[in-house]
Image (tube, grey):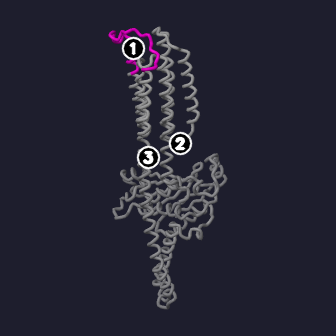
Amino acid sequence: MPGAPPVRHVAAAFNDATGLKNMQQLIQLRWMATYGQLVTIAVVHFGFGIRLPIENMLTLLALLLAFNLASQWRWRRDRQVRNAELFVALLVDVGMLTAQLYLSGGATNPFVFLYLLQVTLAAVLLKPWSTWTMVGITALCFAGLAVFGRPLALPPDHDRGLASPYIQGMLICFALNAALLVIFITRIGKNLRERDAHLADLRQRAAEEEHIVRMGLLASGAAHELGTPLATLAVILGDWCRMPFFTSDPELHQEVSEMQAQVQRCKTIVSGILLSAGEARGESSVETTLCTFMDELAREWRATRPVVRFSYENHVGDDLPMVADPALKQMVGNLLDNALEASPRWTGLAITRDADALMLRVTDEGPGFAPAMLAQIGKPYQSSKGRPGSGLGLFLVVNVARTLGGTVTAHNRPEGGAVVTVRLPLEAITLEPVDAADTLDEAEDTASKEPHARRTAD
């Protein structure tokens, strides 16, 4: 079907979204680090009376603030975030932390253990080579601070326990490390789990599409093989209709005519299979309108099925141009066939427009779906018919709708029976782009000019 994105493109887009989410987590962490450093500098300098080069440290904070504003502006949209960009972002954080530690005690500063936070984030976010590079860089920074750092004039009072400013700083550093690791590792882990779950769905979708391709190849081959015997039967039945033996007996003549109609129906099905497989599509594609296409579909289905009562309602209103698509026709036919099998006495089809989407609602008066089937609508071979190979109708319906960018939902009616609703974007099935501003109110205005929508009931 046109417009179906390859699975690898969808997977790539999802991976990009995961990288963007992780970058946004780093931006949030940098905001917290900026506020935390500002509070810490104020408490140490003014509260504990420990003299700090406050002007230089505030200048570094201003640079970190400017970098984070630029990062937030750059990553406010959906962009591809690569490993190298995450690595550079973490390097900036390590560089800023190193500069602040250099101005406030070097390796003797209890907040030097915040390097472990950067290493842990690298281990979660980056590729192995980047993580080990980050380990080496932080180790060199620690060693450089031990050699070149500016020591603070702190009293040797480590034996005072929690009364010692140094011990208090270590406790705050530990609590900060632990809290940030729990918060951000949990969020990043959630992003990664969502990515894995989505990739699993994509793999399942690829397997289902491969299954459909195999079915299509088998159906196309069978259609080619059936073409010759059906043509032979059509010729023989045509000869029989002209033979006096059959023309003289009205009952036999009627049965032969019925056989001709059924053979013609088989030939139409075979032609539809070949058309859906892509053969002779250019010859058979016909430009039509949405209402005409749906009206003819309902009329043809009613004429070729042994349904007692069939209710058809078309409330679309705007008759948009489209190209008759055999896959869409087969999808609706499968839904109606399933409803007819469950409810031979009555089946209903209602078509409406919901803003920029087409809504197809098939209703029946049968026993409804089992709860287990409702939970797995669209899975192959999920059927209550108990026949080998059954359960492919809804599977094909869901895949055609998904290829067109639509959805399929199902539920049981309180009064009995089931309802299957297909929602298809109009831009995927019509020739003209549908403006999102063309809302349901406009459709209702159009419908109000035509008090009676297209409706047929037998």
**Does the stretch in magenta take in 210?**
no
Q: Residue at x 45, y 60 (%)?
A: 396
Q: Is residue 15 left or right of residue 384?
A: right
| Residue 71 showing in the rendered view | yes
Amino acid identity at mark 2: Gln
Amino acid identity at mark 3: His
Q: Gap between marks 2 and 3, in whole Å?
A: 17 Å
Q: Residue furthest bottom?
A: 244
Q: List the residue tagged with mark 2.
A: 80
Q: Gap between marks 1 and 3, in whole Å?
A: 47 Å
Q: Is residue 4 left or right of residue 112?
A: right
251 is higher (above) or lower (below) than 347: below
Q: Magenta residues?
A: 146-173
Q: Residue at x 50, y 25 (%)?
A: 96
Amino acid identity at mark 1: Tyr
Q: Residue at x 42, y 10 (%)?
A: 154
Residue 137 position in % (x across, y down): 44, 30
Q: Residues within 10 Å of mark 1 (few under 14, many from 20)?
A: many
Q: Secondary structure at mark 3?
A: helix
Q: Which mark, by number, is residue 198?
A: 3
